Amino acid sequence: MHIHVFCADGEAKFWLEPEVKMAKNYHLTAKQLAQIEGTIQERKHDIIDAWHQYFPG
């Protein structure tokens, strides 16, 4: 399971399982990536729940 994060400066792809880990980075700085990863870590369960609601089954 993975998510894409988009912002004005670029985009990144993060794996959610088995652990949060960046898969791809397109033009985001190390600082931006650290902030994004921290937010994903904090909200991981909410993100996974939303994923399952959007993609049932």
Image (cartoon, rainbow, N blue to C red):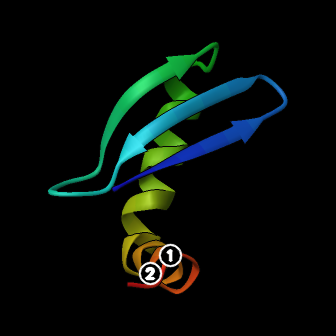
Q: In terms of image quadrants, where is residue 49?
A: bottom left
How much space separates mark 2 and mark 1, taking CA atoms?
5 Å
In the picture of the structure, the residue carrying the numbered disc 1 is 55
Q: Amino acid at mark 1?
A: Phe
Q: Is residue 30 above or below residue 27?
A: below
The quarter of the image holding the C terminus is: bottom left
Give coordinates of residue 10: x percent, y percent.
71, 23
| Badge 1: residue crowd in 10 Å (few <14, some 14–19, many ≥20) | few
Q: Hey, which residue is sitting farthest front in the picture?
A: 57
| Mark 1: secondary structure | loop
Q: Eyeballing the image, is 25 above or below 50?
A: above
Q: Is residue 1 left or right of residue 5?
A: left
**Nearer to me, 54 or 8:** 54
Whether the residues at callouts 2 and 1 have beta carbons within 8 Å, the answer is yes
Q: Is residue 15 left or right of residue 6?
A: left
Q: Is 17 placed above or below 49 here?
A: above
Residue under numbered circle 2 = 52
Residue ranking furthest to the top? 27
Q: Which mark is residue 36?
A: none
Q: Image point 22% across, 57% down: which residue?
A: 17
Image quadrant in which the N terminus is located: bottom left
The residue at 45%/59% (across/down) is 40
Residue at (31%, 56%) from the top-left corner? 16
Q: Quadrant of residue 45?
A: bottom left
Which amino acid type is shown beneath numbered disc 2? His
Q: Residue at x 28, y 51 (%)?
A: 20
